[in-house]
Image (spheres, rainbow, N blue to C red):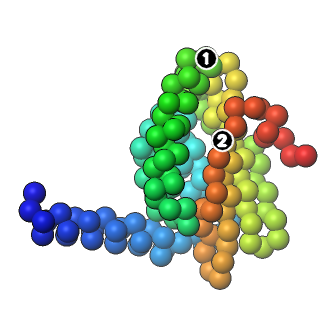
């Protein structure tokens, strides 16, 4: 592939990524729908789709998401081995703190147990963006203290 074509492709991908961020999530409901899309993809085993989607509206550097994805790829194999196949997902809670923070708590359901997932969104002047995410195999972590 020529350098010009590679450069054009890189610019196109960058503009698509930035346009997703520029469009923004206007409401907590849109942020929840965005989170649902990510968790549904994880639950279905479409991990690359989840990480790609995540990158479209976040302040998290793509390299951090890529690093997480690499590590999670190994962990999910152990999850499937011990917990069985995924049987869906469930939104456990959507906690709005003030007017600027939203934490979504999910479980990805497996045959034996669930795995908690947490997505945190921040609203600046206008739009909600994903600022943090994590998962925990300890099911107690999904309960609010």
Residue closest to the eye, 100 or 6: 6
Cα–Cα gap, marks 2 and 1: 17 Å
Which residue does the image show at 66% across and 63% down from the upper left? 121
Q: In screen coordinates, is 48 left or right of 34?
A: left
Q: Regarding mark 1 in the picture, which secondary structure is present there?
A: helix
Q: Earlier in the sequence, mark 2 or mark 1?
A: 1
List x then y, in percent, for residue 12.
27, 68
Q: Residues within 10 Å of mark 1 (few under 14, many from 20)?
A: few
List x then y, in percent, for residue 112.
68, 18
- As drawn, the residue found furthest toward the right would be 145
Quadrant where the image shows the N terminus:
bottom left
Residue 104 in view here: yes
Residue closest to the eye, 71 or 46: 71
| Residue 30, image quadrant | bottom right
| Residue 9, image quadrant | bottom left
Which residue does the image show at 70% across and 37% down from the upper left? 136
Residue closest to the eye, 126 or 132: 132
Circle 1 residue: 82
Q: In screen coordinates, is 23 left or right of 136?
A: left
Q: Residues within 10 Å of mark 2 (few under 14, many from 20)?
A: some
Circle 2 residue: 135
Would you say the residues marked 2 and 1 are in contact, meaning their CB atoms lie under 8 Å apart? no
List x then y, in percent, for residue 13.
31, 64
Which residue does the image show at 78% across and 40% down from the upper left? 142
Q: Is residue 64 above or below residue 43?
A: below
Residue closest to the eye, 29 or 69: 69
- As drawn, the residue found furthest toward the bottom would be 125
Q: How many marks?
A: 2
């Amino acid at each position: 592939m020529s350098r010009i074509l590679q450069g054009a492709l890189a610019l196109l991908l960058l503009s698509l990524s930035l346009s997703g961020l520029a469009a923004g999530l206007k409401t907590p409901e849109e942020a929840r729908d965005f989170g649902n899309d990510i968790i549904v993809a994880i639950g279905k085993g479409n991990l690359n789709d989840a990480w790609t989607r995540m990158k479209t509206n976040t302040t998290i550097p793509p390299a951090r998401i890529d690093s997480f994805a690499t590590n999670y790829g190994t962990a999910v194999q152990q999850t499937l081995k011990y917990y069985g196949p995924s049987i869906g997902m469930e939104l456990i809670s959507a906690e709005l703190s003030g007017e600027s923070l939203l934490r979504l708590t999910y479980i990805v359901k497996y045959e034996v147990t669930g795995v908690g997932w947490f997505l945190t969104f921040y609203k600046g002047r206008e739009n909600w963006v994903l600022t943090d995410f994590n998962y925990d195999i300890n099911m107690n972590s999904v309960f609010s203290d």
